Image (cartoon, helix red, strand yellow):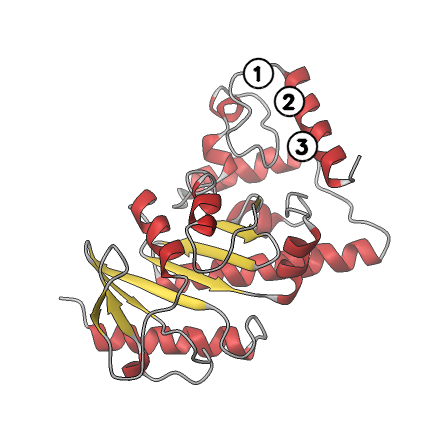
Amino acid sequence: MVNEYEIKKQICDIGKRIYNKGMVASNDGNISVKISENEFLCTPTGVSKGFMTPEYICKVDRDGKVIQANPGFKPSSEIKMHMRVYRERPDVNSVVHAHPLYATSFAIAGIPLTEPIMPEAVIALGCVPIAEYGTPSTEEIPDAVAKYLQHYDAVLLANHGALSFSDSLLNAYHKMESLEFYAQLLYQSKVLGGPKQLTDAQVQRLYEIRRQFGLKGKHPADICPNAKAGKPSCHGCGGSCGDKADSDTVAMITKLVLEQLGK
């Protein structure tokens, strides 16, 4: 039997963590936890995540409709985004949305986090794409995020922030924390003249380590068809490389780079 009060306390604790780490300002961000197939606990709208107590937390159904909420509180307007994740990823039990400074800066600049610079980031995240911009509280963001849900466990939201999701609240939070740390390291290494990326062989070895660990979630190490065939995979391909030849993959990557450079 799920102890809802304890989960509410955990949500408040994670809210304090993301607030104290500067991942959200004012009333930004939202958190949710799946407690049954049709019941979800979530943070309310218009409330600072750093000052919540259990009675703030709302309960909604799979459509985002209120099941229970104390007077003065109603679910976050971003609950549609959370529900889309749960609908398309049955393995996910928690979703965290925040505006971490460095990660959001990359999202605003239109730069995905795809450079392999640190073993832990390669193993835990693989890479982090950017979902196209959508108006907050509408279906635009869920629609933009949906195309990445089967390939990743964290996504940047263009001109908005970041989204992470996993099999537990703590793991979803850890992915957000790892995402921000990765973004900060990448930014600072660029300031110092540019990062020295890991080689393809080193990335493949890290992918193999991840597979050996049997880590849960979605990751390029598991979905790239080249990797499944025992061939080198393209870092950050998101499974979109299909069965194309190496020349097609190079052309695709070149096109993406040129688009980022505004060519």
Amino acid type of the residue that numbered disc 1 sits on in the rendered structure:
Lys
Amino acid type of the residue that numbered disc 3 sits on in the rendered structure:
Asp
Q: Is residue 59 above or below residue 54?
A: above
User: Helix, strand or loop at disc 1?
Assistant: loop
> What crowding class fits label 1: few (fewer than 14 Cα within 10 Å), some (14-19), or many (20 or more)?
few
Amino acid type of the residue that numbered disc 2 sits on in the rendered structure:
Thr
Residue plotted at (28% across, 73% down)? 58
Task: Give the Cα separation between the discs numbered 3 and 2.
Answer: 14 Å
Residue plotted at (70% across, 41% down)? 198
Tell me whether circle 1 and circle 3 mark residues in contact (CB < 8 Å).
no
Residue 134 percent coordinates (x, y): 52, 51
Find residue 214 and report its image quarter.
top left
Which residue matches tag 3? 200
Sooner in the amino-acid sequence: mark 1 or mark 3: 3
Tell me whether circle 3 and circle 2 mark residues in contact (CB < 8 Å).
no
User: Helix, strand or loop at disc 3?
Assistant: helix
Residue plotted at (71% across, 36% down)? 199
Which residue matches tag 1? 244
Tell me whether circle 2 and circle 1 mark residues in contact (CB < 8 Å).
yes
Residue 121 or residue 153, whichever sits in front: 153
Closer to us: mark 3 or mark 2?
2
> What crowding class fits label 3: few (fewer than 14 Cα within 10 Å), some (14-19), or many (20 or more)?
some
- Compared across the picture, whether 157 is left or right of 184 comes to left
Residue 105 percent coordinates (x, y): 68, 60
Residue 58 or residue 125, whichever sits in front: 58
Q: Which residue is outermost to the right?
A: 193
Which residue matches tag 2? 249
Residue 107 percent coordinates (x, y): 63, 54
